[in-house]
Image (spheres, rainbow, N blue to C red):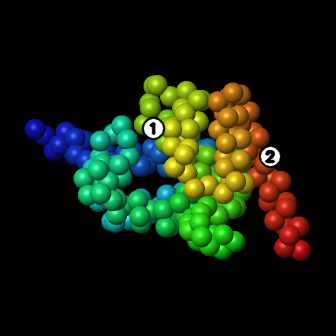
Amino acid sequence: MNISKKIKESGWYNHLKTINEHKIEVGKNCFRCGLYKQGLLHDLSKYSWTEFSVGAKYYQGNRSPNEAEREDKGYTSSWLHHKGRNKHHLEYWIDYDIEHRDRGMTGMKMPDNYIVEMFCDRVAASKIYKKDAYTDRSPLEYYLQGKGKHMLHPYSKKQLERLLYMLAEKGEDETFAYARRYMKAYRKYLRRKKS
């Protein structure tokens, strides 16, 4: 077997290819929404040794390597590292409920720009893993499968679901145009709030 064929069959090469493809796809989505900085910086922690080595070891191509590590070990070191460094994940925003201490942990309100980046991430991940089977309903269907498990703040949930349902019903062009207007209004709001 020649060396280039060996490299192309290795987990690390395929994992690198997948995360690069995902990062590019999320970047395009973020750019369509006016989130240029977030599009460029999205998921940089996936290139750290903590995350990359696990992804390479558990690479399968049709689902996240984190799921395979979780099945193997009962937890995933890569995901624990990732969610604590990337604000577009709802898990980053889970904390103790200070208003209802007896409830324990709950979802905190996410800033709108991270809600939109989370949407962009879900669309890209669905495209990468579903490949030719992807439709504009795929991100919504994936979200609905795990909906009962999500600890999303009601505001964050409403905004994310609005984008997912809009994508499923009206398609990418209309949804990304809406998200771009939404981000423009959000930035205007932040500027007024600062002054």
Looking at the image, which residue is at 50% across and 67% down? 85
Can you tell which quarter of the image residue 139 is in? top right
Can you tell which quarter of the image residue 187 is in? bottom right
How many residues crowd mark 1 within 10 Å: few (<14), some (14–19), many (20+)? some
Instruction: State the SS at label 2.
Output: helix
Q: Earlier in the sequence, mark 2 or mark 1?
A: 1
Residue at the front extreme? Answer: 102
> Which numbered dot is residue 128?
1
- Residue 170: x and y in percent read 71, 28
- Residue 45: x and y in percent read 44, 63
How many residues crowd mark 2 within 10 Å: few (<14), some (14–19), many (20+)? some
Looking at the image, which residue is at 86% across and 70% down? 193
> Which numbered dot is residue 181?
2
Q: Amino acid at mark 1?
A: Ile
- Residue 57: x and y in percent read 25, 53
Q: CA distance from mark 2 to mark 1?
A: 26 Å
Q: Looking at the rendering, in which quadrant would you find the C terminus?
A: bottom right
- Residue 159: x and y in percent read 71, 48
Asked whether disc 2 touches disc 1, contact meaning CB atoms under 8 Å apart, the reply is no
| Relative height, residue 172 to residue 57 (above, below) | above
Q: Looking at the rendering, in which quadrant would you find the N terminus?
A: top left
